[in-house]
Each structure stands twice: as C-alpha cells, then as structure tokens.
C-alpha cells in the first residue's frame, strides 16, 4: 500500500493505493484532508470617479462585460439595457433602474469586473 497526497481544484486528498498482482483492479480510497481554498475574486475594474449628485449602477456579481449599450450623454428610460455582464456562462442584462441621463460609462466590452464595481453613473 502506498500513500500519496493529491490536490484537485484546491482540495488536498490523502490517497492510499494498493498494488495488486495480475489484471485485477486497483483499490483506491481518497479522503479530503484540507478545506477547499476560497475562490479568488475577479480583478476589479479601475475605480471610476462619481460626479456629485450622480447615481451608480454596480455589478451584481463578478464577470466579464460582453456589451455596452449606452454612452455618456445618452438619455435612458427605466428598464433600458445598459450593458451585458457574463457570469458563469450566463448573460445578464444590466438595466437602467430609473429614467435619467448617462454621466459616465466605467466599463468597456471585454472588461472584467468584481461584485459592486461601478458600471455606469447617471443623473
């Protein structure tokens, strides 16, 4: 019997392998010995300065920006598409929470954002 420690996806396992003569199957047992490592957060987008009196739309989860549908100066109605955020292979539409005018767009297609990163400011 040989003992090994194997790490898979950040979890360490102590594994015992029994060598058997001939063509019979090998007995293997694995027991996790270390708690899984905490997932790493996605890198944050550069901090955007928020104009006085402006409201912000923040990323609800970490992910990648696939599309930006607005630019500074655009007027938007409540529910209008601001951008598309991909997270866990799902596309999430980020919609305008209220009527307003876009002050700044803090992201571009291809950007990686963290949870609560500022995407858009408006007034």
Image (spheres, rainbow, N blue to C red):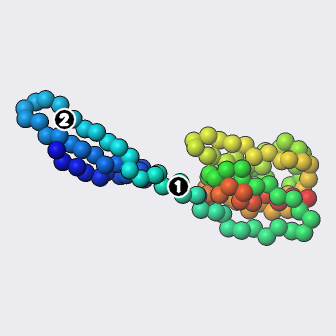
For the C terminus, give its image quadrant: bottom right
Question: Residue 91, position in %: x, y?
Answer: 65, 41
Q: Is residue 90 left or right of residue 23?
A: right
Q: Quadrant of residue 19?
A: top left
Label whose residue precedes the other's in the sequence (1 or 2): 2
Residue position for label 2: 26
Q: Is residue 51 above or below residue 55?
A: below
Dot 2 crowding, Cα within 10 Å, few <14, some 14–19, many 20+: few
Residue position for label 1: 38
Q: Is residue 103 left or right of residue 16?
A: right
Contact (CB < 8 A) between labels 1 and 2?
no
Which residue is pictured at 78% across the width and 49% down the height? 82
Q: Quadrant of residue 71?
A: bottom right
Residue 40 or 107: which is nearer the viewer?
40
Dot 1 crowding, Cα within 10 Å, few <14, some 14–19, many 20+: few
Question: Residue 115, position in %: x, y?
Answer: 68, 55
For the N terminus, give its image quadrant: top left
Question: Residue 119, position in %: x, y?
Answer: 74, 57
Which residue is pictured at 7% across the width and 32% down the height? 22
Residue 73 in view of the camera: no
Which residue is pictured at 86% across the width and 68% down the height? 51
Which residue is pictured at 18% across the width and 35% down the height? 26
Residue 89 or 15: which is nearer the viewer?
15
Question: Residue 104, position in %: x, y?
Answer: 81, 62
Assign a secondary structure to mark 1: loop
């Amino acid at each position: 019997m040989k003992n090994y420690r194997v790490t898979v996806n950040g979890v360490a396992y102590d594994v015992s392998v029994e060598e058997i003569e001939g063509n019979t199957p090998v007995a293997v047992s694995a027991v996790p010995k270390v708690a899984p490592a905490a997932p790493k957060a996605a890198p944050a987008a550069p901090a955007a300065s928020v104009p006085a009196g402006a409201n912000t739309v923040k990323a609800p989860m970490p992910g990648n920006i696939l599309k930006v549908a607005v630019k500074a100066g655009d007027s938007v109605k409540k529910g209008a598409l601001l951008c598309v955020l991909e997270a866990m292979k799902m596309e999430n539409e980020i919609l305008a929470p209220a009527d307003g005018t876009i002050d700044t767009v803090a992201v571009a297609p291809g950007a990686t954002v963290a949870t609560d990163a500022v995407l858009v400011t408006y007034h």
